Amino acid sequence: MRSFDFGKNWQAFSADHVDERRIAVATRSLQDLLGREDLGGASVLDVGCGSGIFAIAAHRIGADHVLGVDINPRSINASEQNLARLTPDAPVTFRLASALDRTAMDGLGMFDLVYAWGSLHHTGAMYTAITNTARLVTPGGTLVLAIYNRHITSPVWRSIKWFYNRVPWPVQRLMAIIFAGIIYLAKLAVTRRNPLEKERGMDFWYDVIDWVGGYPYEYATPTEIERFVARLGFTLRRLVPAQVPTGCNEFVFEQTSA
Ligand SMILES: C[S@@+](CC[C@H](N)C(=O)[O-])C[C@H]1O[C@@H](n2cnc3c(N)ncnc32)[C@H](O)[C@@H]1O
Protein backbone atom coordinates (compact mmCIF):
# COMPACT_ATOMS: atom_id res chain seq x y z
CA MET A 1 0.00 0.00 0.00
CA ARG A 2 1.37 3.42 -0.94
CA SER A 3 0.93 5.71 2.07
CA PHE A 4 1.06 9.45 2.50
CA ASP A 5 4.28 10.84 3.97
CA PHE A 6 2.80 12.64 6.97
CA GLY A 7 6.25 13.28 8.38
CA LYS A 8 7.30 15.37 5.39
CA ASN A 9 4.22 17.56 5.87
CA TRP A 10 4.92 17.87 9.62
CA GLN A 11 8.51 18.88 8.97
CA ALA A 12 7.41 21.62 6.56
CA PHE A 13 4.65 22.79 8.93
CA SER A 14 7.10 22.86 11.84
CA ALA A 15 9.73 24.86 9.98
CA ASP A 16 7.19 27.47 8.90
CA HIS A 17 4.78 27.69 11.79
CA VAL A 18 5.52 26.02 15.10
CA ASP A 19 6.14 28.75 17.65
CA GLU A 20 4.98 29.74 21.13
CA ARG A 21 1.68 31.09 19.79
CA ARG A 22 0.82 27.75 18.15
CA ILE A 23 1.79 25.84 21.28
CA ALA A 24 -0.47 28.12 23.32
CA VAL A 25 -3.42 27.41 20.99
CA ALA A 26 -2.68 23.66 21.04
CA THR A 27 -2.47 23.75 24.84
CA ARG A 28 -5.80 25.56 25.16
CA SER A 29 -7.49 23.05 22.83
CA LEU A 30 -6.11 20.15 24.88
CA GLN A 31 -7.41 21.73 28.10
CA ASP A 32 -10.83 22.39 26.54
CA LEU A 33 -11.18 18.84 25.20
CA LEU A 34 -10.17 17.26 28.51
CA GLY A 35 -12.16 19.76 30.58
CA ARG A 36 -9.08 20.13 32.79
CA GLU A 37 -6.67 23.02 33.20
CA ASP A 38 -3.90 20.89 34.68
CA LEU A 39 -2.71 17.33 34.21
CA GLY A 40 -1.42 17.18 37.77
CA GLY A 41 1.60 14.93 37.27
CA ALA A 42 -0.10 12.48 34.90
CA SER A 43 1.88 10.26 32.57
CA VAL A 44 0.94 10.89 28.93
CA LEU A 45 1.33 8.93 25.71
CA ASP A 46 0.71 10.67 22.36
CA VAL A 47 0.14 8.06 19.64
CA GLY A 48 0.82 9.37 16.12
CA CYS A 49 2.40 12.52 17.55
CA GLY A 50 2.97 14.24 14.17
CA SER A 51 4.71 17.53 14.94
CA GLY A 52 4.89 16.75 18.66
CA ILE A 53 3.07 19.90 19.65
CA PHE A 54 0.46 18.10 21.77
CA ALA A 55 3.15 16.20 23.67
CA ILE A 56 4.78 19.57 24.36
CA ALA A 57 1.36 21.02 25.30
CA ALA A 58 0.77 18.14 27.76
CA HIS A 59 4.09 18.92 29.42
CA ARG A 60 3.18 22.61 29.63
CA ILE A 61 0.02 21.79 31.62
CA GLY A 62 1.68 19.64 34.21
CA ALA A 63 2.21 16.15 32.81
CA ASP A 64 4.94 14.37 34.73
CA HIS A 65 6.45 12.62 31.75
CA VAL A 66 5.31 12.47 28.16
CA LEU A 67 6.11 9.99 25.41
CA GLY A 68 5.23 10.65 21.78
CA VAL A 69 5.34 7.84 19.23
CA ASP A 70 4.90 7.85 15.48
CA ILE A 71 5.53 5.42 12.64
CA ASN A 72 7.20 8.09 10.48
CA PRO A 73 10.85 8.99 11.23
CA ARG A 74 10.29 12.49 9.85
CA SER A 75 7.48 13.05 12.36
CA ILE A 76 9.84 12.02 15.15
CA ASN A 77 12.51 14.33 13.76
CA ALA A 78 10.05 17.28 13.54
CA SER A 79 8.82 16.57 17.08
CA GLU A 80 12.36 16.42 18.50
CA GLN A 81 13.33 19.65 16.78
CA ASN A 82 10.21 21.45 18.03
CA LEU A 83 10.92 20.22 21.54
CA ALA A 84 14.59 21.28 21.39
CA ARG A 85 13.62 24.72 20.09
CA LEU A 86 10.67 25.43 22.39
CA THR A 87 11.07 23.37 25.57
CA PRO A 88 14.58 21.99 25.91
CA ASP A 89 15.25 19.76 28.92
CA ALA A 90 11.54 18.93 29.36
CA PRO A 91 10.73 15.31 30.33
CA VAL A 92 9.27 14.65 26.90
CA THR A 93 10.64 11.93 24.62
CA PHE A 94 9.76 10.80 21.13
CA ARG A 95 10.16 7.31 19.77
CA LEU A 96 9.55 5.48 16.52
CA ALA A 97 6.75 2.92 16.99
CA SER A 98 3.69 1.68 15.14
CA ALA A 99 0.29 1.49 16.76
CA LEU A 100 -0.18 -1.75 14.82
CA ASP A 101 2.76 -3.45 16.53
CA ARG A 102 1.25 -4.83 19.71
CA THR A 103 4.56 -5.99 21.18
CA ALA A 104 6.19 -2.61 20.63
CA MET A 105 3.15 -0.80 22.04
CA ASP A 106 2.98 -3.01 25.13
CA GLY A 107 6.65 -2.22 25.70
CA LEU A 108 5.90 1.49 26.08
CA GLY A 109 4.30 1.03 29.51
CA MET A 110 0.99 2.27 30.95
CA PHE A 111 -0.21 5.89 30.95
CA ASP A 112 -2.82 8.00 32.78
CA LEU A 113 -3.68 9.79 29.54
CA VAL A 114 -3.37 8.27 26.10
CA TYR A 115 -3.98 10.79 23.34
CA ALA A 116 -4.41 9.61 19.75
CA TRP A 117 -5.80 12.54 17.82
CA GLY A 118 -6.36 11.98 14.13
CA SER A 119 -3.82 9.20 13.85
CA LEU A 120 -5.40 5.75 14.20
CA HIS A 121 -7.64 6.15 11.13
CA HIS A 122 -4.42 6.51 9.08
CA THR A 123 -2.83 3.21 10.14
CA GLY A 124 -4.58 0.94 7.62
CA ALA A 125 -6.13 -1.17 10.41
CA MET A 126 -7.94 1.32 12.62
CA TYR A 127 -9.63 -1.10 15.02
CA THR A 128 -6.41 -3.03 15.66
CA ALA A 129 -4.67 0.29 16.33
CA ILE A 130 -7.44 1.38 18.72
CA THR A 131 -7.19 -1.94 20.58
CA ASN A 132 -3.38 -1.73 20.91
CA THR A 133 -3.61 1.89 22.05
CA ALA A 134 -6.44 1.43 24.55
CA ARG A 135 -4.49 -1.38 26.30
CA LEU A 136 -2.00 1.22 27.53
CA VAL A 137 -4.47 3.26 29.61
CA THR A 138 -4.20 2.79 33.38
CA PRO A 139 -7.37 1.88 35.33
CA GLY A 140 -9.43 5.05 35.70
CA GLY A 141 -7.25 6.73 33.08
CA THR A 142 -8.30 8.68 30.00
CA LEU A 143 -8.27 7.76 26.33
CA VAL A 144 -8.67 10.54 23.77
CA LEU A 145 -9.45 9.63 20.17
CA ALA A 146 -10.25 11.72 17.12
CA ILE A 147 -11.57 9.67 14.21
CA TYR A 148 -12.89 10.79 10.84
CA ASN A 149 -16.67 10.85 10.65
CA ARG A 150 -18.45 8.46 8.28
CA HIS A 151 -20.28 10.43 5.60
CA ILE A 152 -21.86 9.59 2.26
CA THR A 153 -18.83 11.22 0.55
CA SER A 154 -16.23 9.26 2.58
CA PRO A 155 -15.63 6.54 -0.09
CA VAL A 156 -15.09 9.27 -2.71
CA TRP A 157 -12.52 10.95 -0.48
CA ARG A 158 -10.78 7.62 0.01
CA SER A 159 -10.41 7.29 -3.78
CA ILE A 160 -9.10 10.86 -4.06
CA LYS A 161 -6.47 10.17 -1.40
CA TRP A 162 -5.51 6.85 -3.00
CA PHE A 163 -5.09 8.65 -6.33
CA TYR A 164 -3.05 11.51 -4.76
CA ASN A 165 -0.47 9.02 -3.53
CA ARG A 166 0.01 7.59 -7.02
CA VAL A 167 0.57 10.74 -9.07
CA PRO A 168 3.78 12.74 -9.46
CA TRP A 169 4.56 15.74 -7.29
CA PRO A 170 3.31 18.48 -9.70
CA VAL A 171 -0.10 16.78 -9.97
CA GLN A 172 -0.24 16.47 -6.18
CA ARG A 173 0.47 20.19 -5.90
CA LEU A 174 -2.28 20.98 -8.41
CA MET A 175 -4.74 18.79 -6.52
CA ALA A 176 -3.86 20.53 -3.23
CA ILE A 177 -4.44 23.97 -4.79
CA ILE A 178 -7.80 22.96 -6.30
CA PHE A 179 -8.97 21.32 -3.08
CA ALA A 180 -7.78 24.27 -0.98
CA GLY A 181 -10.35 26.41 -2.82
CA ILE A 182 -13.10 23.82 -2.51
CA ILE A 183 -12.40 23.15 1.19
CA TYR A 184 -12.21 26.89 1.94
CA LEU A 185 -15.65 27.54 0.44
CA ALA A 186 -17.24 24.40 1.91
CA LYS A 187 -15.95 25.16 5.42
CA LEU A 188 -17.05 28.78 5.19
CA ALA A 189 -20.54 27.70 4.10
CA VAL A 190 -20.92 25.07 6.84
CA THR A 191 -19.26 26.78 9.82
CA ARG A 192 -19.73 30.49 8.88
CA ARG A 193 -16.23 31.05 10.27
CA ASN A 194 -13.00 32.04 8.51
CA PRO A 195 -11.40 28.71 7.47
CA LEU A 196 -7.93 30.28 7.70
CA GLU A 197 -8.37 30.64 11.47
CA LYS A 198 -7.49 27.07 12.45
CA GLU A 199 -8.16 25.34 15.72
CA ARG A 200 -5.55 23.28 17.62
CA GLY A 201 -2.62 25.41 16.44
CA MET A 202 -2.84 23.96 12.93
CA ASP A 203 -2.49 25.72 9.56
CA PHE A 204 -5.00 25.78 6.70
CA TRP A 205 -2.58 24.95 3.86
CA TYR A 206 -0.78 22.10 5.65
CA ASP A 207 -4.14 20.75 6.80
CA VAL A 208 -5.36 20.70 3.19
CA ILE A 209 -2.31 18.66 2.12
CA ASP A 210 -2.81 16.33 5.12
CA TRP A 211 -6.49 15.94 4.18
CA VAL A 212 -6.10 15.43 0.42
CA GLY A 213 -3.11 13.10 0.79
CA GLY A 214 -3.86 11.38 4.10
CA TYR A 215 -3.96 7.71 3.10
CA PRO A 216 -4.65 5.05 4.42
CA TYR A 217 -7.97 6.56 5.44
CA GLU A 218 -10.73 5.01 7.52
CA TYR A 219 -13.81 6.52 9.11
CA ALA A 220 -16.64 5.64 11.48
CA THR A 221 -19.81 7.01 13.01
CA PRO A 222 -19.62 8.14 16.64
CA THR A 223 -21.76 5.14 17.62
CA GLU A 224 -19.42 2.67 15.89
CA ILE A 225 -16.46 4.04 17.83
CA GLU A 226 -18.31 4.28 21.13
CA ARG A 227 -19.54 0.66 20.89
CA PHE A 228 -16.13 -0.69 19.92
CA VAL A 229 -14.25 1.15 22.66
CA ALA A 230 -16.92 0.24 25.25
CA ARG A 231 -16.14 -3.43 24.55
CA LEU A 232 -12.52 -2.67 25.52
CA GLY A 233 -13.68 -1.54 28.98
CA PHE A 234 -14.21 2.21 28.50
CA THR A 235 -17.07 4.61 29.16
CA LEU A 236 -17.58 7.62 26.90
CA ARG A 237 -17.34 10.80 28.97
CA ARG A 238 -17.40 13.36 26.19
CA LEU A 239 -18.11 13.46 22.46
CA VAL A 240 -17.36 16.54 20.36
CA PRO A 241 -19.02 16.00 16.97
CA ALA A 242 -17.16 16.92 13.80
CA GLN A 243 -17.64 20.55 12.74
CA VAL A 244 -17.92 19.53 9.07
CA PRO A 245 -19.41 16.23 7.82
CA THR A 246 -16.07 14.60 6.96
CA GLY A 247 -14.17 16.07 9.92
CA CYS A 248 -13.02 14.30 13.07
CA ASN A 249 -15.33 13.30 15.91
CA GLU A 250 -13.46 13.73 19.20
CA PHE A 251 -13.96 11.22 22.02
CA VAL A 252 -12.89 11.33 25.65
CA PHE A 253 -13.18 7.89 27.25
CA GLU A 254 -12.52 6.74 30.81
CA GLN A 255 -11.09 3.29 31.53
CA THR A 256 -13.82 1.81 33.74
CA SER A 257 -13.29 -1.94 33.51
CA ALA A 258 -10.98 -2.33 36.51
C1 LIG B 1 -2.94 13.51 10.86
S1 LIG B 1 -1.47 13.17 11.76
C2 LIG B 1 -1.97 13.61 13.42
C3 LIG B 1 -0.84 14.17 14.25
C4 LIG B 1 -1.14 14.61 15.65
N1 LIG B 1 -1.74 13.57 16.45
C5 LIG B 1 -2.00 15.84 15.69
O1 LIG B 1 -3.07 15.83 16.26
O2 LIG B 1 -1.55 16.87 15.16
C6 LIG B 1 -1.40 11.42 11.80
C7 LIG B 1 -0.08 10.89 12.35
O3 LIG B 1 -0.24 9.49 12.59
C8 LIG B 1 0.96 8.85 12.23
N2 LIG B 1 0.72 7.41 12.00
C9 LIG B 1 0.17 6.82 10.91
N3 LIG B 1 0.17 5.48 11.07
C10 LIG B 1 0.71 5.22 12.29
C11 LIG B 1 0.99 4.03 13.02
N4 LIG B 1 0.70 2.82 12.54
N5 LIG B 1 1.55 4.16 14.24
C12 LIG B 1 1.86 5.37 14.76
N6 LIG B 1 1.64 6.53 14.11
C13 LIG B 1 1.06 6.47 12.89
C14 LIG B 1 1.42 9.60 11.00
O4 LIG B 1 2.79 9.38 10.69
C15 LIG B 1 1.08 11.03 11.37
O5 LIG B 1 2.15 11.70 11.98
Image: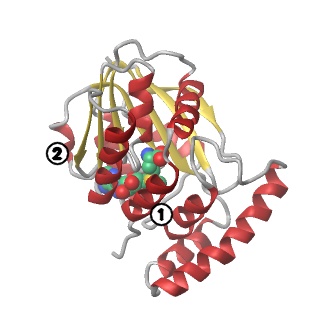
Which quadrant holds residue 185?
Answer: bottom right
Q: Position of residue 150 (x, y in %)?
A: 60, 56
**Residue 176 — which label?**
none
Report if the beta carbon of the residue with label 1 is closer than 8 angstroms to ligand 1: no
Which residue is farthest front?
85
**Relative to the observer, which residue lies in front, 187 or 169?**
169
Label 1 CA crowd tier, 10 Å (few <14, some 14–19, many 20+): many
Q: Which residue is mark 2?
A: 104
**Between disc 1 and disc 2, whose residue precedes?**
2
Name the element at disc 1. Answer: loop
Callout 2, which amino acid?
Answer: Ala
What residue sits 53% from the left and 24% below the top? 34
**Relative to the observer, which residue lies in front, 158 or 3?**
3
What residue sits 54% from the left and 77% below the top? 159
Quadrant in the picture for the N terminus: bottom left
What residue sits 60% from the left and 82% below the top? 174
**Relative to the observer, which residue lies in front, 164 or 225?**
164
Callout 1, which amino acid?
Answer: Tyr
Label 2 CA crowd tier, 10 Å (few <14, some 14–19, many 20+): some
Q: Note whether residue 122 is visible.
A: yes
Left or right: residue 256 compared with residue 186:
left
Circles 1 and 2 in contact, beta carbons < 8 Å? no
Q: Position of residue 72 (x, y in %)?
A: 30, 58
Q: Position of residue 33 (x, y in %)?
A: 57, 29
**Residue 217 — which label?**
1
